[in-house]
Amino acid sequence: MEQFTDIGFAKLDTARAGRTGMGESVYCPGKTPEQLKTIMEEFIHRGAAVLGTRCSEEQAGFLRMNNLPVKYDRVSRLLTAGTQEVNHHRGLVAVCTGGTADIPVAEEAAQTAEFFGATAVRHFDVGVAGIHRLFARIEDIRKADAVIAVAGMEGALAGVIAGLVECPVIAVPTSAGYGAAFGGVAPLLTMLNSCAEGVAVVNIDNGFGAGVMVCRMLHMAERTRNK
Amino acid sequence: MEQFTDIGFAKLDTARAGRTGMGESVYCPGKTPEQLKTIMEEFIHRGAAVLGTRCSEEQAGFLRMNNLPVKYDRVSRLLTAGTQEVNHHRGLVAVCTGGTADIPVAEEAAQTAEFFGATAVRHFDVGVAGIHRLFARIEDIRKADAVIAVAGMEGALAGVIAGLVECPVIAVPTSAGYGAAFGGVAPLLTMLNSCAEGVAVVNIDNGFGAGVMVCRMLHMAERTRNK
Amino acid sequence: MEQFTDIGFAKLDTARAGRTGMGESVYCPGKTPEQLKTIMEEFIHRGAAVLGTRCSEEQAGFLRMNNLPVKYDRVSRLLTAGTQEVNHHRGLVAVCTGGTADIPVAEEAAQTAEFFGATAVRHFDVGVAGIHRLFARIEDIRKADAVIAVAGMEGALAGVIAGLVECPVIAVPTSAGYGAAFGGVAPLLTMLNSCAEGVAVVNIDNGFGAGVMVCRMLHMAERTRNK
Amino acid sequence: MEQFTDIGFAKLDTARAGRTGMGESVYCPGKTPEQLKTIMEEFIHRGAAVLGTRCSEEQAGFLRMNNLPVKYDRVSRLLTAGTQEVNHHRGLVAVCTGGTADIPVAEEAAQTAEFFGATAVRHFDVGVAGIHRLFARIEDIRKADAVIAVAGMEGALAGVIAGLVECPVIAVPTSAGYGAAFGGVAPLLTMLNSCAEGVAVVNIDNGFGAGVMVCRMLHMAERTRNK
Amino acid sequence: MEQFTDIGFAKLDTARAGRTGMGESVYCPGKTPEQLKTIMEEFIHRGAAVLGTRCSEEQAGFLRMNNLPVKYDRVSRLLTAGTQEVNHHRGLVAVCTGGTADIPVAEEAAQTAEFFGATAVRHFDVGVAGIHRLFARIEDIRKADAVIAVAGMEGALAGVIAGLVECPVIAVPTSAGYGAAFGGVAPLLTMLNSCAEGVAVVNIDNGFGAGVMVCRMLHMAERTRNK
Amino acid sequence: MEQFTDIGFAKLDTARAGRTGMGESVYCPGKTPEQLKTIMEEFIHRGAAVLGTRCSEEQAGFLRMNNLPVKYDRVSRLLTAGTQEVNHHRGLVAVCTGGTADIPVAEEAAQTAEFFGATAVRHFDVGVAGIHRLFARIEDIRKADAVIAVAGMEGALAGVIAGLVECPVIAVPTSAGYGAAFGGVAPLLTMLNSCAEGVAVVNIDNGFGAGVMVCRMLHMAERTRNK
Amino acid sequence: MEQFTDIGFAKLDTARAGRTGMGESVYCPGKTPEQLKTIMEEFIHRGAAVLGTRCSEEQAGFLRMNNLPVKYDRVSRLLTAGTQEVNHHRGLVAVCTGGTADIPVAEEAAQTAEFFGATAVRHFDVGVAGIHRLFARIEDIRKADAVIAVAGMEGALAGVIAGLVECPVIAVPTSAGYGAAFGGVAPLLTMLNSCAEGVAVVNIDNGFGAGVMVCRMLHMAERTRNK
Amino acid sequence: MEQFTDIGFAKLDTARAGRTGMGESVYCPGKTPEQLKTIMEEFIHRGAAVLGTRCSEEQAGFLRMNNLPVKYDRVSRLLTAGTQEVNHHRGLVAVCTGGTADIPVAEEAAQTAEFFGATAVRHFDVGVAGIHRLFARIEDIRKADAVIAVAGMEGALAGVIAGLVECPVIAVPTSAGYGAAFGGVAPLLTMLNSCAEGVAVVNIDNGFGAGVMVCRMLHMAERTRNK
């Protein structure tokens, strides 16, 4: 059986769903609008739902100008075509941010999780500088099956939440901040050094990665449920 | 109700199990042997199972010299007292290493997971330099509910595995290596930049953190099973 | 009037008290035991109280072997001779630590503040991983005129406290931790990027600097009181 | 009693003044003009004075186009609405810069301090390359209750001043400079390693943070005065 | 005999072919269009084939506007004039990329190798996240005399290939990626720390250097063949 | 006697010539065109020759639009008004570059040295990749009283020259290069680690600093001559 | 057919010779003496020649105490058992060092190349600070089929040689040096940024990797010879 | 004429005095005691004065045990044999340190300068934290032909002095300090970014390099005097 589709400049990993349990996704930067169009057409032609990440407005505009049936979200920069058929995870993900500037990354995480079948609840601007805002939400957050904590600057949110909940916490450092935030290095280090247990970290601004990670967890939970 | 026990130089978080679903653990470095003894006695006195991490031989020797009922594993440097009562996760964790030098960190991860109730299967020295060694094991690894990928030097193991399995992968960079490995920075960056989805990363050499993280996932899976 | 005492390898800044309002201090590393002895003798001879920082046990032992009237504290590595005559600040400093491994730095801060006339109250091991421990103490901490927040690893303590108190917070990152803590760089960056206002930072492990800083603040407050 | 106002994408910390003694402030970057408008309207509606930092000309223009009663200062990029009622600190802050290029950050510091009730005196372009310029001003600087030392490039100003005054010095590294200044890293390190006592540091270009910090000190002095 | 041509702002190394066995090349950045024109004219005048690297569209446009007989490839940004006379290497180079975003660098490598006489076969988008794509090609890759492995982000491709082939592998890290990829530092470190033997690394995005390096190898092989 | 002129946002160090033997200079970045105009007018009014560094075309244009008698060199970005009266150094400076892209920095160095009275001879594009180009010039270079070696990328030029000449070598790393050149860090480190003796280094791209440094040397030589 | 031998803590890649054309090697650090003994016995038992790298004196002593037929070289820290049967490369490698302190790494490179069948000629202490030493040897170096250039501190040797020879140059940065050499980072960057073409770089102090790399090249040359 | 002496592991650059005007020196680290002995014997045999740098006590002891006529200074770790015959520079060098911990590096600088014929005057412990100590000495310092400014921690000394003297200033950052001093990186950056003109920098702790550099300047001055 064919494992991938070779279109020259790219090898579409069309067997990924079978191998990793998750559908297709495309990393858009560094692709010309034409290349992206060719890739998306191939997926659409196969009837596969597909998620494009970090899609620029220019790329999205080119696709729409060429009448591809895609949706584009400006905040998260996510491009989608088709719908995942089965909402099989039925899990609940709490997506929290330290501030308002972290929202684009958080939306990338939340919408990615939703694309792959999870339910996402947003708790934005609950950073530790005014920790009562977090406590006002903590009971809701504790109901989630997984938390995605998105924060720039000092990035302390993930560790504080991890000390307050039972479920796993995926931490996403963001490049929000200035000076010694060093484009996300500061929150990245904070999150890696979290004193609280139960935190694991993805790349700076990688909301997509966080969204997929929690879906893998929920997927695993579902499989064990069905054993 | 009392939330922690104050012994002056430390506040023992005796309510952690209720709050985060995981039992007690103690970070041993920076504590004098006497301080560690006081802490362990308090936990033992309360009948709580407790896990000490990064315990030096000198610290462990002092505790045994003082007849505390503790166990010490030289490879993982884990110190344990008591046993977690309920092996409630019933989950299966595959702990993989790139090389032999990564084993101490991998054992810390595996034994931590076991301490908190999971079953750990070890796949050591399956690094990508001889990738057929990984393929010889991949079917077994695919059976796990979660993978812990432990690797130093280039650290590519986590990403390669993540592209081959359905379950979540927790990546642990190690300080094994020299020169431009920069004490674990190289594999840390590799893992954070993994092209494969479904990877999240803990601190360099933090086998304990990986072990707890997968247990939180398995715990969550168990809770959803019981809903 | 003479501004300093020249003893060749060092120029003792004996006019510092007049110029900056604080007494003498000596940075001990890099000085031979003999050099340190000559310096301390000069201060003792002049009847000045003096504080030596980061003094090694070997240096302290040499001084005592030579019968100098000095005191040495092993935890903080502070060396003292004489007593500041006037306890003129009458201010209250809360010295908080994230964990037990931060205590040596915290003691350096607390004892420095005490040497220069402040009253220090210690709140150790109140890190954000178990934030209820901090909340149990927060009312006491809020009574202080200044807070010194000492933390390694993620270093989030300073920012969380700053969001909860009115007084200025001096943050001291420590080198406690491993891996991506990079010898204190991680908490240093966290503290510099604190989202909460009212935090300023001193060098990694610089408890002495934090102690002096809060005394300058209390001293200023005293002066304004007397205007 | 209500602790904050939830407007979805942000949780306005309207209880901050009661908790930390300082009024409201808003970090403008990463907010859309519309989001910023909503936030400012909420504060204005409540009659609260509020300070917006790092506001872009585009953001400020949008607010004025929508007839919000705000003031905008192009040099400091500060946005203000309303006036703090009580000028309760009565303290004097000396704001010094190494060069002319540091003025925007210094103005952010000075105007922030003024917004929160302090009196700021400016001493610009007194860097150590021509140290007689500093000495010509030092008597005036010594009269202040606190010094804010703003410098890029080598950043030596803070340490030199701290050796000449009694009051606390808040150091602000700036990104002025090129090459091995690394966007402010050089002066940041210089300031953290200051040999003089009585210096604490805020983030690169964080004039706002320095302004708030000195106000916290002055506020504390005022409280102790009234005891 | 003349060793180079001095045109004031540049000394054209016209004896390079004799000394190092490879023809001329010109690094275009930092040269004004006029300077580049003068240099190219000199080479063209001498009848030498020459390769310009990192040529901007503006530079290339200026040359064409001035009717210089040059070719320009937008993807690789290579500028060429003339043809190397002897295709003397007769070697086969496999140029592989991790993803589509690495293609410009890969094309620089492949076309450089071709310019200097080698035959290049492209295998694009065979990164380790979907390792079956690499295995589908590995037999072809194994036929090459040298491999150029081009990858950004995690950069694991080079090490995995090196473990599967007999020939030398030149690794080219690219700046494709974001966040903790740090502009190519992450794949650079990965490649330098490759556990597999037989990998050597060139600068980030330096496809040209990789192309020359493999040609030197092939050239050497040819010379030993003729001994 | 007046030591400097206070124009508010700047303190013009008009006594510098008397104190350091060198005339005035102005660092232009971070100054508004208006501020720069005020500063230049003050110097021109006093009849002092002055050198402005890193002047943008916009700044220079504003000055000329306002009819200030200044000269502007686009390559070096130097702005000058007036002429140093005495060409008192009579020294010879060899300004060498590794490549053509280093010329702007080299011109800044050469023209600065010329402004302060030295004679500069340029040897451009003599980098070590074709070391015979350097050897063709070395006899001329050896006649100089001081060498300024300007190089980006690997930056090896300074050390190689220092091993071949008797006079002092001032090394200027440049930001020419890409990838792991890290904006000049690579040549900076190379130059600092030069195995050859007789090299000292200035900031990345700091041609001005190198020019002044050699003039200080020549000035010193002149003074000793006149003793 | 069996692809590797599984001894639990290690998977011996006994098929490597077939797959990559090179024999076995073992990275010794991080292995207990007992583990190393088990591994070496397995290879010896199979009659395979094997090379151990970075072997400590303690490890080597343990093996000899247990009568394993191994050889140990203290300078290169290489451990060998058996002999490669076929000296099939017949290639000539010039191993050059900048200084005497680079010799251990150079010997690791030279002896590795010799182990795998090449002939190594040593040219030590020919660094660029006294470049006539290099020129005295350059004719000999030009006769080699490949050059390994080993240098610490500034690391300029590789680039200078590459500009003078036709064959490929493998550059090995070493940790020899101090201060801003940063443990080999300075020569690593120098080598990566080499202006001369025909240089590729291995990890800091990785003499072994350089030795293998040149053997792969020679091996490839041999294969093409036999086509 | 012979250009160097080849003793296998080293090529003694015996023509250096003729080429660069300075005598011989040997970098001792990384040499076995036996190698160092062979080198020194060769120089002594030739009647050349020679300077060994960073010589360990063990190395020096071995030489003396073997009756070589060498002198060793423990503070500067300099090893000398013979005496430079001509004290031809007759220049005056002021060697200043920020603190006592910088003295070893300063002595290396001063004694190197003295070895090569200059007169060195020491001004130790005149750091900017108590700047009156520097002013008490500044008239003496201004009499020097060159200044060597040695400082760790913040490293501001060099820039402050450069603003006060006419002669060139060579800055030596030292590794004295802790935390964010990063082994000398902080003072290195401070010195490279010095706002004052007339500063050039050598490697961290490189007192030797500074000593040679000023001698090259004095030597040049002497040559120009004799023209």
Image (cartoon, coloured by chain):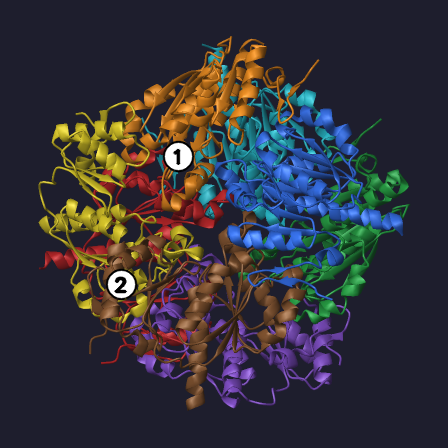
Chain colours: A yellow, B red, C purple, D brown, E orange, F blue, G cyan, H green
Label 1: chain letter: B
**What is the secondary structure assignment of the residue under circle 1?**
helix
Alpha carbon separation for disc pair 1 and 2: 63 Å
Which of these two is toward me, G190 or A72?
Answer: A72
Amino acid at the residue labelled 1 = Ala
Tell if the residue under mark 1 belongs to the same chain as the one under mark 2: no
Amino acid at the residue labelled 2 = Leu
Q: Splitting the image into 4 quarters, where does residue C92 fall?
A: bottom left
- Residue H28 visible in rendering: no
Mark seen at residue B129: 1
Which of these two is toward me, H61 or E64?
Answer: E64
- Looking at the image, residue B126 sits to the left or right of residue H100; the answer is left
Marks 1 and 2 close (CB-CB < 8 Å): no
- Residue E15 visible in rendering: yes
Decide: is A110 above or below F75: below
Q: How many residues crowd mark 2 within 10 Å: few (<14), some (14–19), many (20+)?
A: some
Decide: is H107 above or below E175: below
Percent coordinates x, y for residue D174 in the rendering: 50, 58
Which of these two is toward me, H215 or B199?
Answer: H215
Mark seen at residue G166: none
Which quadrant does the C terminus of chain B fall into?
Answer: bottom left
Mark seen at residue D68: 2
Percent coordinates x, y for residue E131 in the rendering: 29, 32
Label 2: chain letter: D
Residue at x-position 17% and y-position 59%? A144
- Looking at the image, residue F105 sits to the left or right of residue B114; the answer is right
- Looking at the image, residue D53 sits to the left or right of residue H20; the answer is left
**What is the secondary structure assignment of the residue under circle 2?**
loop
